[in-house]
Image (cartoon, rainbow, N blue to C red):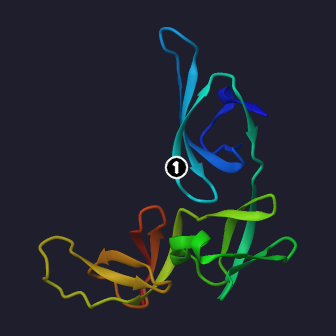
Amino acid sequence: MISTNDFHTGLTIELDGQVYQVIDFQHSKSGRGSAFVRTKLKNMEEGYVINKTFRANEKIERAHVDKREMQYLYWDDSGYVFMDKENYSQITISDEQIGDKINYIKENMSIYILIYEGQPLDIDLPTFVELKVEDTPPGIKGDTVSGGTKTAVMETGLKVKVPLFINEGDILKIDTRSDEYIERIESN
């Protein structure tokens, strides 16, 4: 059990049988009455966000979530298969659970998976990934006055707006938080 005074961003707690991660919190004290803590909590299994207010010093059950480095192996009809790099055990994550995050994951890539009581909760993507451009129209010199963009389809199927000088086969650094092109790593 932890006190609401110990809340910090990223903390995982158990509330009503569900695991939540503290996204934001604010301690408040009104003129009259007792202090309280306003929080934004993300449900780790479902992905939705709730607002919840706690009394100051209220005791909450902490959820101990393991962060395990795993390697993405392949996809089959049951979902996406990952292998634990320490004990070589495999887990499968469903299409619904992984969602759009699969657009940043390549075969044999190492990523962190958050596990609670033996069940995968979420995938912790790196901030940046390097992906190869599979398809993009050719950029024509003189199309714009200043830095135009075009759409590029990456090797995972992700569509990204890129500068006109990007060609098929280029390897790009992509921000996983915003789907934005950062820089060209390698030119074809």
> Residue placed farthest to the front in the image?
16
- Residue 100 is situated, as x and y percent measured from the top left of the image, at 50, 72
Where 126 falls versus 110 (above or below)? above
- Residue 123: horizontal and vertical position, in percent? 63, 65
Mark 1 residue type: Val
Above or below 124: residue 55: above
Image mark count: 1
Please tell me which residue is depicted at 13% across the width and 83% down the height of the picture. 142
Q: Quadrant of the N terminus?
A: top right
Q: Residue at x 66, y 43 (%)?
A: 11
Q: In x, y percent, where is residue 3?
A: 72, 28
- Which residue is situated farthest in the top direction here? 32
Categorize mark 1 by other alpha carbons within 10 Å: few (<14), some (14-19), many (20+). some
Image position of 103 with respect to 179: above or below = below
Residue drawn at the location 21% of the way across and 72% of the way down: 147
SS for dot 1: strand
Quadrant for residue 82, please give it.
bottom right
Disc 1 marks which residue? 49
Q: Residue at x 56, y 58 (%)?
A: 47
